[in-house]
């Protein structure tokens, strides 16, 4: 019995081959996470090597900001790593694809014509990450006005003043908007450009259409991603060494289940 689907043109040619967007269930998230963990176990060395890069980079950058007395910008800097998380998904999706097809190398997908689409999507999330940090800085200066005299005074002011709570509320609201945008445009598009010869615009359009077809599912998946990244970030970001590969591989399996 076939699943209900929504067709999306794959190309602008005279005979477009449609993608079929399947109706998803919450059980698909559990299945994708289980399959993602299986991929992590099977591709342990390659997956963990990439997974280490993000927490190490986060700790180093955060350390530099703290040493420069820029503590107010450490949280948005680190929290914003979720916005560039899809970059890691590219590698994990390639590994999952390699394992699924029994191919010898996952690197081959990072060549033309797919490379151009991959680069454009990567640029998109990097620009969103930069925009988020600029917005976060604007919110900070709009509420506090200037840099704090010390880290201790900043922390005290955040939690004991109206301006501090305003900073928290506005920052979280803005961060949620950026996170939602990145989720919608990337959760299908990044695995898709690894798997098929499509433009970045076509991949993003498919991702948006998948969200429209499965809004509850996408919201639930976004919650799983957010919870996983939060828990993985608690032990100095190094829990991400496990969380990132599982989520990245799972993204591939969600794409494979959702897009025909």
Image (cartoon, rainbow, N blue to C red):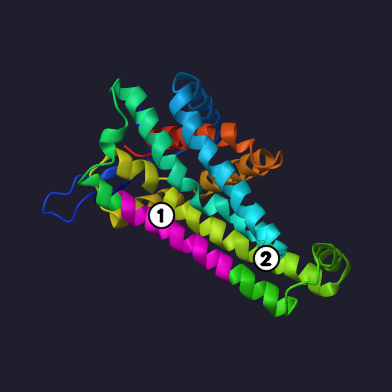
Q: Say left or right for 118 vs 249.
A: left
> Where does the image place residue 127, in percent across and percent down from the top left?
44, 63
The answer to whether residue 243 of the structure is visible from this angle is: yes
The answer to whether residue 205 of the structure is visible from this angle is: no
Q: Residue at x 30, y 57 (%)?
A: 201
**What is the number of callouts on the image?**
2
Q: Say left or right for 193 vs 87.
A: left
User: Taking 25 as reference, is 156 above or below it?
Assistant: below
- Residues 18 and 64: in front is 64
Q: Residue at x 84, y 62 (%)?
A: 152
Quadrant for the C terminus in the image: top left
> Where does the image place residue 213, in percent across and percent down from the top left?
43, 49
Q: Residue at x 33, y 43 (%)?
A: 192
Quadrant for the N terminus in the image: top left
Q: Say left or right for 51 vs 162.
A: left
Label pair 2/1, CB-CB below 8 angstroms:
no
Q: Main secondary structure of the magenta part?
A: helix
**Which class describes the residues within 10 Å of circle 2: few (<14), some (14-19), or many (20+)?**
some
Q: Residue at x 60, y 49 (%)?
A: 60
Furthest residue in direction right, as rendered? 160
Circle on res. 171: 2
Circle on res. 208: 1
User: Taking 64 as reference, is 131 above or below it?
Assistant: below
Pointer 2 or 1: first along the chain: 2
Residue 182 magenta-highlighted: no
Circle on res. 100: none
Q: Distance between the residues labelled 2 and 1?
A: 25 Å
Q: Say left or right for 11 vs 254.
A: left
Residue 119 magenta-highlighted: yes
Which stretch appears magenta?
Answer: 118-134
| SS of the residue under disc 1 | helix
């Amino acid at each position: 019995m076939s699943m209900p689907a929504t067709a999306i043109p794959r190309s602008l040619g005279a005979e477009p081959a449609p993608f079929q967007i399947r109706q998803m269930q919450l059980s698909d998230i559990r299945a994708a996470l289980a399959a993602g963990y299986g991929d992590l176990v099977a591709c342990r060395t390659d997956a963990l090597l990439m997974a280490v890069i993000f927490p190490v980079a986060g700790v180093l950058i955060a350390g530099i900001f703290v040493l420069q007395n820029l503590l107010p910008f450490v949280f948005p800097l680190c929290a914003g790593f979720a916005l560039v998380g899809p970059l890691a998904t590219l590698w994990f999706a390639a590994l999952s694809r390699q394992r699924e097809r029994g191919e010898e190398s996952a690197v081959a997908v990072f060549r033309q014509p797919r490379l151009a689409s991959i680069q454009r999507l990567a640029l998109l999330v990097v620009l969103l990450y930069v925009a988020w940090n600029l917005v976060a800085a604007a919110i900070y200066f709009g509420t506090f006005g200037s840099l704090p005299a010390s880290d201790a005074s900043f922390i005290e002011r955040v939690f004991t003043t109206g301006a501090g709570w305003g900073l928290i509320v506005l920052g979280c609201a803005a961060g949620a908007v950026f996170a939602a945008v990145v989720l919608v445009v990337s959760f299908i598009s990044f695995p898709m450009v690894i798997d098929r010869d499509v433009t970045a615009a076509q991949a993003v359009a498919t991702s948006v259409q998948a969200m429209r077809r499965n809004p509850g599912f996408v919201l639930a998946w976004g919650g799983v991603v957010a919870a996983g990244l939060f828990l993985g970030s608690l032990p100095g970001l190094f829990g991400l060494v496990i969380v990132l590969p599982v989520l990245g591989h799972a993204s591939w399996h969600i794409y494979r289940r959702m897009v025909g």
